[in-house]
Image (tube, rainbow, N blue to C red):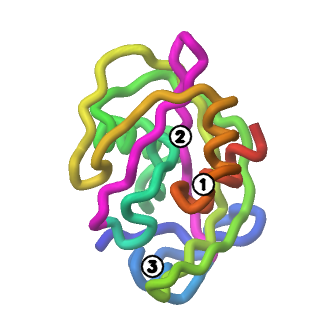
Amino acid sequence: MPQVILVTKRNRKIGEMEKLKVHREALLHRGFSILIFNLKNEILLQKRAKNKYHSGGLWTNACCSHPRSNETYTQAVHKRLKQEMGFDCPLTKQFCFIYKCDFKNGLTEHEYLCVYFGRYDGSIKINPAEASTYKWISLKDLKKDIKMSPGKYTYWFKLIVEKI
């Protein structure tokens, strides 16, 4: 399993550790989430593959992951977007925040999360190891559905949607 970057609350690197161990020990580490909008201003969602180590089968943003020790955020976001959704596009960092969430399987996501926005209207080719399907939805309909069925969505994605 890959290494992730451990950080302080100000996102200063303090070390690296194997990803699963970090999630078992609830250590603060770098992460990112990518939100993609189309020309109709709809947001692209992916349904996480059921076999993901946490939050499998839940709807979330187009792509989320962790920069590796030898990557900048910029390198990581473009690489993972291509790996997960089969395309790349210009991305702009919008904001960062820290969150912590315990999962039923004993893992904890404790991230310094940076959120990137992009615009894309081309074809999508999802990686089945990452996502089972995708859809486009208006922000208005998304917020309504999150309110009615919050259990269908990942924890961090609901936090992001509150901020946009």
State left or right for residue 6 relative to residue 164.
left
Report the residue marked by disc 1. Answer: 149
| Pair 3/1: label in front | 1
Q: Which mark is residue 34?
A: 2
Q: What residue is rendered at 58% in x and 83% in y?
A: 26
Labels 2 & 1 near each other (Cβ < 8 A): no
Cα separation between marks 2 and 1: 22 Å
Residue 19 at x, y = what percent?
41, 74
Mark 3 Cα shell of 10 Å, populated few (<14), some (14-19), many (≥20)? some
Q: How many labels does the image show?
A: 3
Q: Give the range drawn in magenta.
A: 28-51
Tell me: residue 63, above or below residue 111. Answer: above
Residue 85 at x, y = what percent?
33, 36
Q: Which of 17 and 123 is in front in this view?
A: 123
Q: Which of 21 and 36 is in front in this view?
A: 36
Report the residue marked by disc 3. Answer: 17
N-term-proximal mark, 3 vs 1: 3
> Which kind of residue does numbered mark 2 sit on?
Ile
Q: What residue is rendered at 51% in x and 17% in y?
A: 38
- The answer to which quarter of the image holds residue 95 is top right
N-term-proximal mark, 3 vs 2: 3
> Which kind of residue does numbered mark 3 sit on?
Met
Q: What residue is rendered at 60% in x and 54% in y?
A: 149
Q: Tell me the chief SS of the magenta region.
A: strand
> Which kind of residue does numbered mark 1 sit on?
Ser
Residue 35 colored in magenta in the image: yes
